[in-house]
Amino acid sequence: MNIKNTKELIEEEGKYLIQTYKQPEMVLDRGEGTKVWDIEGKMYYDFIGGIAVNSLGYCHPGIVEAIHKQSEKLIHCSNLFYNAPQILLARELVNNSCGDRVFFGNSGAEANEAAIKLAVKYFKEQGKEKFKIIYMKDSFHGRTIATLAATGKYKYQKDYLSLLPAFKQAIFNDLDSIKDAYDENVAAVLVEPVQGEGGINIATVEFMEGLREFCDSKGILLIFDEIQCGLGRTGKMFAYQNYNIEPDMLTLAKPLGGGLPLGALIAKEKIASAYKPGDHGTTFGGNPVACAAALAFLEVLEEDGLLAECQKKSKYFQKNLELLKTNYPGLIKEIRVIGLMVGLELEKDGLVVVKKMLDEGILINCTAGNVLRFLPPLIVQEKEIDYLVNALDKIFKEIK
Ligand SMILES: Cc1ncc(COP(=O)(O)O)c(C=O)c1O
């Protein structure tokens, strides 16, 4: 049965998919640049970019070509054998970051799992029993068991508490809380330089420098989850470059594979060498097609000067939101911006705005209950930002 109609398709979805998502009543069909169309032909400007994945927009020709070329040669070979795109991508990531070696998985959660296991293994090699991770309230690191244990949202953890390792929660941007959470079994501190799901909460310089100093003083590891905030999103290649410090390990995913599933753990040599052949692995991770797409993504990022573009658009976006805020002081609580990670905290629930934006032909999302989150492609145009801000203005007039 060839079903083309939105209503029928959504009915089928209700019958056949495990119901883990809440989705609006439209079915996406195709995209180009910052625009995406549903199957009924309605166009939307995408200001959530597949949750920070589509940094080059939809179907960037460089990514499409790389996928096409590689898929004609070799789609999959497993990690029983070498493949060139994986090796070349690892070299590129190492040459551009503070790390020395890379492990590839297929998602953000897997990259974080690899980092958590490696932290424990690193100390095991030294004969030390360190197996706890300090994580932050309102963090998000994934939905697997270990990454869920490090995700500071009780609503996600509550049904699985008996399965979760005993990680320790601290407060983001509060160094004293890290010191309080520390005990001799702690192996690492895991932190997002910018909390995405938590509501675009930006780590302060003081916190990050203090964290580095604290981890060094205790001989424990500092892991940055840059899955949402890395690879150009903050206007720097890596979010840690906004601070005067380096992490011991760094995790990436989302935009890395240009839309294909790909995650990466980057670690300093002395830590990476704790993993020996057989200690960790995956069937698909570092798949040649995903790695070829990632190489194309990194090339476009550099050649098109997208870091500078991101910084420029960020300022423009912020300026326009600040102007909007002056008109709605009782409605807009705070604006938080770093690069093209933008959070607009409302005094009320944000879902109603998300729904109304959809009617205006704009995709956004609401996180942490009342934070409108914007993660547009780095290629977003100023006139598209104007369109978004005008739509917000119209909706705020209605709901204030
Ligand atoms: C900061 C951060 N870490 C980890 C993850 C998990 O990534 P994935 O959904 O690819 O497993 C996410 C996903 O939103 C994230 O934002």
Image (spheres, rainbow, N blue to C red):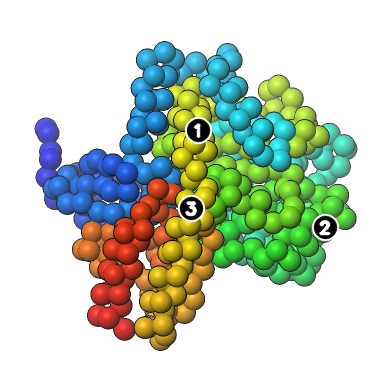
Badge 3 density bin: few <14, some 14–19, many ≥20, Cα 10 Å? many
Locate residue 371 relative to residue 14 in the image: left or right: right
**Of the two numbered discs 2 and 3 in the rendering, the one whose residue sits closer to the viewer:** 3
Q: Nearer the viewer, residue 74 or 383?
A: 383
Q: Position of residue 331 (x, y in %)?
A: 39, 82
Quick check: is the Cβ at mark 2 less than 8 Å away from ligand 1?
no
Label 2 – label 1 distance at C-alpha: 35 Å
Question: Which of disc 3 and disc 2 is earlier in sequence?
Answer: 2
Q: Position of residue 301 (x, y in %)?
A: 49, 40
The answer to whether residue 138 shows anywhere in this view is no
Question: Which of disc 1 and disc 3 is earlier in sequence?
Answer: 1
Residue type, label 2: Glu
Q: Position of residue 136 (x, y in %)?
A: 64, 61
- Residue at left offset 55%, top offset 44%: 231
Q: Nearer the viewer, residue 372 or 15?
A: 372
Residue type, label 3: Cys
Label 3 – label 1 distance at C-alpha: 16 Å
Locate residue 144 relative to residue 272 in the image: left or right: left
Snapshot quadrant of residue 86: top right
Residue at numbered disc 1: 299
Residue at numbered disc 2: 213
Disc 2 + disc 1, Cβ < 8 Å: no
Q: Quadrant of the C terminus?
A: bottom left
Report helix, strand or loop for mark 2. helix
- Residue at left offset 88%, top offset 37%: 127
Q: Which mark is residue 310?
A: 3
Badge 2 density bin: few <14, some 14–19, many ≥20, Cα 10 Å? some
Report helix, strand or loop for mark 1. helix
Badge 1 density bin: few <14, some 14–19, many ≥20, Cα 10 Å? some
